[in-house]
Amino acid sequence: MKLKNKIGAGLVALLVAGGVGVAVAPAASAHTGDLNVSYTCDTTTGEYVGTAELTISQTGLAGVTNWKVGTTNFEGTPSSDAGLSGALPSTGAGKITLGTFRLPGDTKTKGPWVYAFTTWTDGFKKGSDGQAYQNLAGDCTVPYVPPADAKFDVGITPATCTVGETLSYSEGNFTNATVVAGSTPSGTAGPAAYSVSATPNQGAAFVEGQTNPIAGNLAGPIGNQSTDPAAPCYVAPPEEPEQPEPIVTVVETSDKDCDAKTVTTTVTTTTSNRTVYNEETNTWDPIEDLVEVTSSERPTTAEECPVTVTPTPTPEESSPAPQPSETPEGVLAFTGAPTMAPFLWFAGSAIGLGLIAIIAMAIVQRRKAHTTEQ
Protein backbone atom coordinates (compact mmCIF):
# COMPACT_ATOMS: atom_id res chain seq x y z
CA MET A 1 0.00 0.00 0.00
CA LYS A 2 2.59 2.55 1.06
CA LEU A 3 4.99 1.26 -1.57
CA LYS A 4 2.34 1.78 -4.24
CA ASN A 5 1.58 5.23 -2.95
CA LYS A 6 5.26 6.15 -3.09
CA ILE A 7 5.59 4.81 -6.64
CA GLY A 8 2.51 6.74 -7.65
CA ALA A 9 3.85 9.95 -6.12
CA GLY A 10 7.20 9.47 -7.88
CA LEU A 11 5.55 9.03 -11.23
CA VAL A 12 3.54 12.17 -10.73
CA ALA A 13 6.67 14.11 -9.87
CA LEU A 14 8.50 12.83 -12.95
CA LEU A 15 5.64 13.69 -15.22
CA VAL A 16 5.40 17.17 -13.82
CA ALA A 17 9.12 17.65 -14.13
CA GLY A 18 8.98 16.44 -17.76
CA GLY A 19 6.26 18.90 -18.60
CA VAL A 20 3.59 16.18 -18.70
CA GLY A 21 0.25 17.31 -17.34
CA VAL A 22 -1.42 14.95 -14.70
CA ALA A 23 -5.09 15.21 -13.85
CA VAL A 24 -5.46 15.18 -10.02
CA ALA A 25 -8.90 14.64 -8.46
CA PRO A 26 -10.05 17.16 -5.92
CA ALA A 27 -9.09 16.27 -2.31
CA ALA A 28 -12.70 15.90 -1.22
CA SER A 29 -13.22 12.94 -3.52
CA ALA A 30 -9.83 11.18 -3.24
CA HIS A 31 -11.04 8.68 -0.56
CA THR A 32 -7.64 7.48 0.82
CA GLY A 33 -7.00 5.09 3.70
CA ASP A 34 -3.73 4.56 5.57
CA LEU A 35 -3.64 1.40 7.86
CA ASN A 36 -1.15 1.40 10.72
CA VAL A 37 -0.31 -1.43 13.18
CA SER A 38 1.40 -0.72 16.51
CA TYR A 39 2.24 -2.88 19.58
CA THR A 40 2.42 -2.43 23.36
CA CYS A 41 3.48 -4.90 26.07
CA ASP A 42 0.88 -6.05 28.61
CA THR A 43 3.05 -6.68 31.68
CA THR A 44 0.21 -8.32 33.58
CA THR A 45 0.08 -11.20 31.10
CA GLY A 46 3.43 -10.97 29.29
CA GLU A 47 1.80 -10.54 25.85
CA TYR A 48 2.10 -8.03 22.99
CA VAL A 49 -1.13 -6.17 22.25
CA GLY A 50 -1.45 -5.16 18.62
CA THR A 51 -3.69 -2.20 17.68
CA ALA A 52 -4.87 -1.67 14.10
CA GLU A 53 -5.83 1.93 13.14
CA LEU A 54 -7.13 3.24 9.81
CA THR A 55 -6.62 6.89 8.92
CA ILE A 56 -9.17 8.18 6.37
CA SER A 57 -8.50 11.42 4.50
CA GLN A 58 -9.67 13.46 1.52
CA THR A 59 -13.36 12.78 2.05
CA GLY A 60 -16.25 14.06 4.07
CA LEU A 61 -18.54 11.17 3.31
CA ALA A 62 -19.69 8.40 5.65
CA GLY A 63 -18.29 4.96 5.16
CA VAL A 64 -18.16 1.43 6.56
CA THR A 65 -14.94 -0.53 7.08
CA ASN A 66 -14.52 -4.29 7.56
CA TRP A 67 -11.19 -5.79 8.59
CA LYS A 68 -9.27 -8.88 9.71
CA VAL A 69 -5.88 -10.01 11.08
CA GLY A 70 -3.96 -12.23 8.69
CA THR A 71 -0.61 -13.99 9.00
CA THR A 72 2.97 -12.89 8.55
CA ASN A 73 2.64 -13.74 4.84
CA PHE A 74 1.19 -10.94 2.71
CA GLU A 75 -2.09 -11.96 1.06
CA GLY A 76 -2.56 -8.88 -1.12
CA THR A 77 -4.61 -5.71 -0.69
CA PRO A 78 -8.31 -6.57 -0.42
CA SER A 79 -10.47 -5.76 -3.42
CA SER A 80 -13.69 -6.50 -1.56
CA ASP A 81 -14.89 -7.12 1.99
CA ALA A 82 -15.07 -10.89 1.42
CA GLY A 83 -13.64 -12.69 4.48
CA LEU A 84 -13.59 -9.47 6.49
CA SER A 85 -15.83 -8.42 9.36
CA GLY A 86 -16.46 -5.62 11.80
CA ALA A 87 -18.64 -3.16 9.82
CA LEU A 88 -17.09 -0.18 11.62
CA PRO A 89 -18.75 3.14 10.66
CA SER A 90 -16.82 6.34 9.88
CA THR A 91 -17.79 9.88 8.94
CA GLY A 92 -15.50 11.96 6.82
CA ALA A 93 -11.78 12.10 7.39
CA GLY A 94 -10.24 10.88 10.63
CA LYS A 95 -8.66 7.96 12.45
CA ILE A 96 -10.69 4.94 13.49
CA THR A 97 -9.49 1.99 15.58
CA LEU A 98 -10.27 -1.25 13.87
CA GLY A 99 -9.48 -3.40 16.93
CA THR A 100 -6.78 -5.19 18.93
CA PHE A 101 -5.18 -8.62 18.97
CA ARG A 102 -2.49 -10.38 21.03
CA LEU A 103 0.84 -12.04 20.30
CA PRO A 104 3.12 -14.06 22.57
CA GLY A 105 5.61 -11.94 24.47
CA ASP A 106 8.57 -13.71 22.87
CA THR A 107 7.51 -12.84 19.25
CA LYS A 108 10.45 -11.44 17.23
CA THR A 109 8.83 -10.75 13.84
CA LYS A 110 6.82 -7.79 12.52
CA GLY A 111 3.69 -9.67 13.37
CA PRO A 112 0.77 -10.45 11.07
CA TRP A 113 -0.60 -8.35 8.23
CA VAL A 114 -3.86 -6.52 8.86
CA TYR A 115 -6.34 -5.94 6.05
CA ALA A 116 -9.27 -3.51 5.70
CA PHE A 117 -11.83 -2.60 3.06
CA THR A 118 -13.91 0.58 3.15
CA THR A 119 -17.05 1.46 1.22
CA TRP A 120 -18.31 5.08 1.14
CA THR A 121 -21.84 6.29 0.56
CA ASP A 122 -21.00 7.51 -2.94
CA GLY A 123 -20.11 3.94 -3.89
CA PHE A 124 -16.34 4.48 -3.82
CA LYS A 125 -14.43 1.49 -2.39
CA LYS A 126 -10.85 1.10 -1.23
CA GLY A 127 -8.74 -1.72 0.23
CA SER A 128 -6.00 -1.11 2.80
CA ASP A 129 -3.26 -3.23 4.41
CA GLY A 130 -0.63 -2.69 7.02
CA GLN A 131 2.08 -4.30 9.20
CA ALA A 132 4.55 -3.19 11.85
CA TYR A 133 7.58 -1.32 10.46
CA GLN A 134 10.13 -3.40 12.40
CA ASN A 135 10.48 -6.70 14.17
CA LEU A 136 9.30 -7.03 17.78
CA ALA A 137 12.00 -7.52 20.41
CA GLY A 138 10.38 -10.59 22.01
CA ASP A 139 10.97 -9.17 25.49
CA CYS A 140 7.40 -8.69 26.70
CA THR A 141 7.28 -10.41 30.10
CA VAL A 142 5.58 -10.05 33.43
CA PRO A 143 7.91 -8.12 35.71
CA TYR A 144 9.25 -10.13 38.64
CA VAL A 145 7.47 -9.26 41.83
CA PRO A 146 8.96 -10.63 45.03
CA PRO A 147 6.44 -12.83 46.84
CA ALA A 148 4.51 -11.14 49.59
CA ASP A 149 5.01 -12.32 53.14
CA ALA A 150 2.36 -14.82 54.23
CA LYS A 151 1.79 -15.61 57.87
CA PHE A 152 -0.93 -16.55 60.32
CA ASP A 153 -1.49 -17.24 63.97
CA VAL A 154 -4.27 -18.23 66.36
CA GLY A 155 -5.36 -17.06 69.79
CA ILE A 156 -6.07 -19.07 72.93
CA THR A 157 -8.56 -17.62 75.42
CA PRO A 158 -7.64 -18.65 78.99
CA ALA A 159 -9.84 -21.14 80.79
CA THR A 160 -12.44 -19.99 83.29
CA CYS A 161 -14.08 -21.75 86.20
CA THR A 162 -16.66 -23.36 83.95
CA VAL A 163 -15.24 -23.10 80.37
CA GLY A 164 -11.96 -24.55 79.15
CA GLU A 165 -9.35 -22.82 77.01
CA THR A 166 -10.95 -21.62 73.77
CA LEU A 167 -9.41 -21.50 70.27
CA SER A 168 -9.91 -18.11 68.61
CA TYR A 169 -9.04 -16.80 65.14
CA SER A 170 -10.57 -14.80 62.28
CA GLU A 171 -9.55 -13.26 58.94
CA GLY A 172 -7.40 -10.79 60.80
CA ASN A 173 -5.14 -13.64 61.92
CA PHE A 174 -4.22 -14.47 58.30
CA THR A 175 -1.92 -12.25 56.20
CA ASN A 176 -1.72 -13.22 52.53
CA ALA A 177 -2.88 -16.68 53.58
CA THR A 178 -6.11 -18.66 53.70
CA VAL A 179 -7.20 -21.17 56.33
CA VAL A 180 -7.42 -24.76 55.09
CA ALA A 181 -10.81 -26.46 55.19
CA GLY A 182 -10.96 -29.07 57.93
CA SER A 183 -8.99 -27.02 60.43
CA THR A 184 -10.32 -26.97 64.00
CA PRO A 185 -13.07 -24.33 64.07
CA SER A 186 -12.60 -21.10 65.99
CA GLY A 187 -14.56 -21.23 69.24
CA THR A 188 -13.60 -24.80 70.11
CA ALA A 189 -13.29 -25.14 73.89
CA GLY A 190 -11.17 -27.57 75.88
CA PRO A 191 -10.47 -30.12 76.88
CA ALA A 192 -9.72 -30.85 73.21
CA ALA A 193 -6.92 -31.08 70.67
CA TYR A 194 -6.73 -28.51 67.87
CA SER A 195 -4.94 -28.08 64.52
CA VAL A 196 -5.16 -25.07 62.17
CA SER A 197 -3.50 -25.07 58.72
CA ALA A 198 -3.23 -22.37 56.03
CA THR A 199 -2.00 -21.93 52.45
CA PRO A 200 -0.27 -18.81 51.12
CA ASN A 201 -2.23 -16.76 48.61
CA GLN A 202 -1.02 -16.44 44.98
CA GLY A 203 2.23 -14.54 44.80
CA ALA A 204 2.92 -14.95 48.51
CA ALA A 205 5.15 -17.23 50.55
CA PHE A 206 5.23 -18.03 54.24
CA VAL A 207 7.78 -16.09 56.22
CA GLU A 208 10.70 -17.98 57.65
CA GLY A 209 9.81 -19.76 60.85
CA GLN A 210 6.07 -19.93 60.18
CA THR A 211 4.57 -23.00 61.87
CA ASN A 212 2.05 -24.81 59.69
CA PRO A 213 -0.10 -26.32 61.00
CA ILE A 214 -0.42 -24.70 64.38
CA ALA A 215 -1.54 -27.46 66.73
CA GLY A 216 -1.82 -28.20 70.41
CA ASN A 217 -4.18 -29.12 73.23
CA LEU A 218 -6.79 -26.94 74.90
CA ALA A 219 -7.03 -27.33 78.68
CA GLY A 220 -10.39 -27.92 80.30
CA PRO A 221 -12.21 -25.66 82.79
CA ILE A 222 -10.45 -24.71 86.02
CA GLY A 223 -13.44 -26.06 87.96
CA ASN A 224 -15.18 -24.74 91.04
CA GLN A 225 -13.84 -25.42 94.53
CA SER A 226 -15.34 -24.99 97.98
CA THR A 227 -12.32 -25.35 100.22
CA ASP A 228 -10.47 -22.02 99.94
CA PRO A 229 -12.61 -18.87 99.85
CA ALA A 230 -9.59 -16.78 98.85
CA ALA A 231 -8.72 -18.93 95.84
CA PRO A 232 -10.30 -18.55 92.37
CA CYS A 233 -13.54 -20.33 91.51
CA TYR A 234 -14.65 -20.63 95.13
CA VAL A 235 -18.26 -21.68 95.56
CA ALA A 236 -19.71 -22.04 99.03
CA PRO A 237 -20.76 -25.63 99.68
CA PRO A 238 -24.51 -26.14 99.76
CA GLU A 239 -26.23 -26.85 103.06
CA GLU A 240 -26.59 -30.55 103.58
CA PRO A 241 -30.26 -31.60 103.70
CA GLU A 242 -31.67 -33.56 106.60
CA GLN A 243 -31.31 -37.30 106.21
CA PRO A 244 -34.61 -39.22 106.04
CA GLU A 245 -35.30 -41.49 108.99
CA PRO A 246 -34.99 -45.22 108.26
CA ILE A 247 -37.99 -47.46 108.92
CA VAL A 248 -37.38 -50.62 110.99
CA THR A 249 -39.86 -53.51 110.82
CA VAL A 250 -39.49 -56.60 113.09
CA VAL A 251 -41.35 -59.83 112.40
CA GLU A 252 -41.03 -62.77 114.92
CA THR A 253 -42.16 -66.34 114.25
CA SER A 254 -41.96 -69.51 116.43
CA ASP A 255 -41.85 -73.14 115.39
CA LYS A 256 -42.68 -75.77 118.13
CA ASP A 257 -41.41 -79.35 117.80
CA CYS A 258 -42.84 -81.54 120.61
CA ASP A 259 -41.02 -84.58 119.28
CA ALA A 260 -37.68 -82.80 119.67
CA LYS A 261 -39.07 -80.89 122.67
CA THR A 262 -37.72 -77.58 121.22
CA VAL A 263 -39.15 -74.20 120.20
CA THR A 264 -37.27 -72.34 117.41
CA THR A 265 -37.84 -68.55 117.33
CA THR A 266 -36.94 -66.61 114.11
CA VAL A 267 -36.70 -62.78 114.16
CA THR A 268 -36.60 -60.93 110.78
CA THR A 269 -35.55 -57.24 111.07
CA THR A 270 -36.03 -55.13 107.87
CA THR A 271 -34.58 -51.62 107.70
CA SER A 272 -36.09 -49.67 104.78
CA ASN A 273 -35.93 -46.04 103.62
CA ARG A 274 -32.14 -46.18 103.94
CA THR A 275 -30.09 -43.43 102.18
CA VAL A 276 -26.51 -42.40 101.53
CA TYR A 277 -25.25 -38.83 101.02
CA ASN A 278 -24.18 -37.76 97.49
CA GLU A 279 -21.71 -34.87 97.69
CA GLU A 280 -21.93 -34.03 93.98
CA THR A 281 -25.70 -33.54 93.99
CA ASN A 282 -26.12 -32.68 97.68
CA THR A 283 -28.88 -35.22 98.03
CA TRP A 284 -29.61 -38.37 100.01
CA ASP A 285 -29.76 -41.16 97.48
CA PRO A 286 -31.80 -44.27 98.34
CA ILE A 287 -30.04 -47.59 98.85
CA GLU A 288 -31.36 -51.12 99.18
CA ASP A 289 -33.16 -52.32 102.29
CA LEU A 290 -31.17 -54.09 105.03
CA VAL A 291 -32.63 -57.42 106.10
CA GLU A 292 -31.25 -59.22 109.20
CA VAL A 293 -32.48 -62.67 110.28
CA THR A 294 -31.66 -64.23 113.70
CA SER A 295 -32.90 -67.47 115.27
CA SER A 296 -32.80 -69.05 118.75
CA GLU A 297 -33.86 -72.38 120.26
CA ARG A 298 -35.19 -73.32 123.73
CA PRO A 299 -36.81 -76.36 125.33
CA THR A 300 -40.59 -76.65 125.33
CA THR A 301 -42.59 -76.22 128.54
CA ALA A 302 -45.08 -78.71 130.05
CA GLU A 303 -47.93 -76.45 128.98
CA GLU A 304 -46.61 -76.28 125.42
CA CYS A 305 -46.14 -80.04 125.17
CA PRO A 306 -48.17 -81.89 127.99
CA VAL A 307 -46.89 -85.38 129.09
CA THR A 308 -49.52 -88.18 129.04
CA VAL A 309 -48.98 -90.69 132.00
CA THR A 310 -50.42 -94.21 131.63
CA PRO A 311 -51.11 -95.80 135.18
CA THR A 312 -49.74 -99.25 136.00
CA PRO A 313 -52.64 -101.70 136.69
CA THR A 314 -52.85 -103.65 140.10
CA PRO A 315 -52.97 -107.43 140.17
CA GLU A 316 -56.71 -107.27 140.78
CA GLU A 317 -57.23 -104.81 137.96
CA SER A 318 -55.21 -106.95 135.71
CA SER A 319 -57.52 -109.96 136.43
CA PRO A 320 -60.59 -110.46 134.30
CA ALA A 321 -63.64 -108.74 135.81
CA PRO A 322 -66.51 -111.06 136.84
CA GLN A 323 -69.63 -110.97 134.78
CA PRO A 324 -72.50 -109.11 136.50
CA SER A 325 -75.45 -111.23 137.63
CA GLU A 326 -79.00 -110.42 136.91
CA THR A 327 -80.49 -108.20 139.59
CA PRO A 328 -84.05 -107.26 139.97
CA GLU A 329 -84.87 -103.70 139.00
CA GLY A 330 -84.54 -101.30 141.95
CA VAL A 331 -82.14 -103.50 143.87
CA LEU A 332 -78.53 -102.49 144.07
CA ALA A 333 -76.11 -105.07 142.94
CA PHE A 334 -72.54 -105.18 144.06
CA THR A 335 -69.68 -106.88 142.42
CA GLY A 336 -66.04 -107.06 143.15
CA ALA A 337 -63.82 -108.64 145.71
CA PRO A 338 -65.47 -110.05 148.85
CA THR A 339 -63.52 -107.66 151.06
CA MET A 340 -65.20 -104.60 149.42
CA ALA A 341 -68.77 -105.81 149.60
CA PRO A 342 -69.74 -104.47 153.05
CA PHE A 343 -68.40 -101.04 152.22
CA LEU A 344 -70.12 -100.86 148.90
CA TRP A 345 -73.43 -102.09 150.37
CA PHE A 346 -73.33 -99.43 153.05
CA ALA A 347 -72.53 -96.71 150.59
CA GLY A 348 -75.29 -97.77 148.29
CA SER A 349 -77.80 -97.89 151.08
CA ALA A 350 -76.91 -94.40 152.24
CA ILE A 351 -77.27 -93.02 148.80
CA GLY A 352 -80.62 -94.69 148.36
CA LEU A 353 -81.97 -93.32 151.62
CA GLY A 354 -80.76 -89.84 150.74
CA LEU A 355 -82.56 -89.93 147.45
CA ILE A 356 -85.78 -91.08 149.12
CA ALA A 357 -85.58 -88.22 151.61
CA ILE A 358 -85.03 -85.65 148.91
CA ILE A 359 -88.03 -86.92 146.93
CA ALA A 360 -90.26 -86.88 150.02
CA MET A 361 -89.32 -83.34 150.87
CA ALA A 362 -90.06 -82.23 147.34
CA ILE A 363 -93.57 -83.80 147.52
CA VAL A 364 -94.31 -82.06 150.84
CA GLN A 365 -93.19 -78.71 149.52
CA ARG A 366 -95.34 -79.05 146.44
CA ARG A 367 -98.48 -79.89 148.49
CA LYS A 368 -97.92 -76.87 150.77
CA ALA A 369 -97.62 -74.62 147.82
CA HIS A 370 -100.87 -76.02 146.35
CA THR A 371 -102.78 -75.49 149.62
CA THR A 372 -101.62 -71.88 149.90
CA GLU A 373 -102.86 -71.09 146.46
CA GLN A 374 -106.34 -72.40 147.31
Image (cartoon, rainbow, N blue to C red):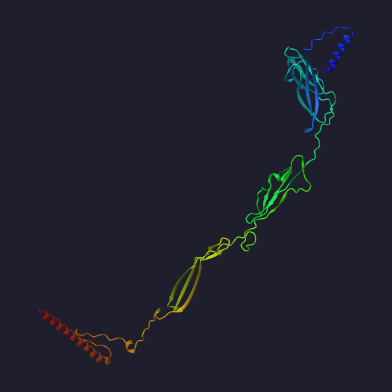
> As rendered, which of 251 and 18 lies closer to the eye?
18
Image quarter (top left, top right, bottom left or bottom right) of the C terminus: bottom left
Image quarter (top left, top right, bottom left or bottom right) of the N terminus: top right
Q: Percent from the top left, x then y, of residue 319? A: 32, 87
Residue at the location (78% across, 25% down)? 51
Residue at the location (75% across, 24% down)? 99
> As rendered, which of 79 and 96 lies closer to the eye?
96
Is residue 38 something that shows in the picture? yes
Q: Is residue 324 left or right of residue 218?
A: left
Residue at the location (13% across, 82% down)? 368
Q: Is residue 371 left or right of residue 254?
A: left
Q: Please, is residue 194 above or below residue 146 in the view?
A: below
Q: Residue furthest front?
A: 230
Q: Percent from the top left, x then y, of residue 318? A: 33, 87
Q: Residue furthest left?
A: 374
Is residue 83 something that shows in the picture? no
Residue at the location (88% across, 10% down)? 14
Q: Please, is residue 372 above or below residue 207 in the view?
A: below
Q: Percent from the top left, x then y, of residue 59? A: 76, 14
> As rendered, which of 3 and 55 lies closer to the eye?
55
Q: Please, is residue 11 above or below residue 193 in the view?
A: above
Q: Please, is residue 318 above or below residue 8 in the view?
A: below
> As rendered, which of 103 and 336 lies closer to the eye?
103
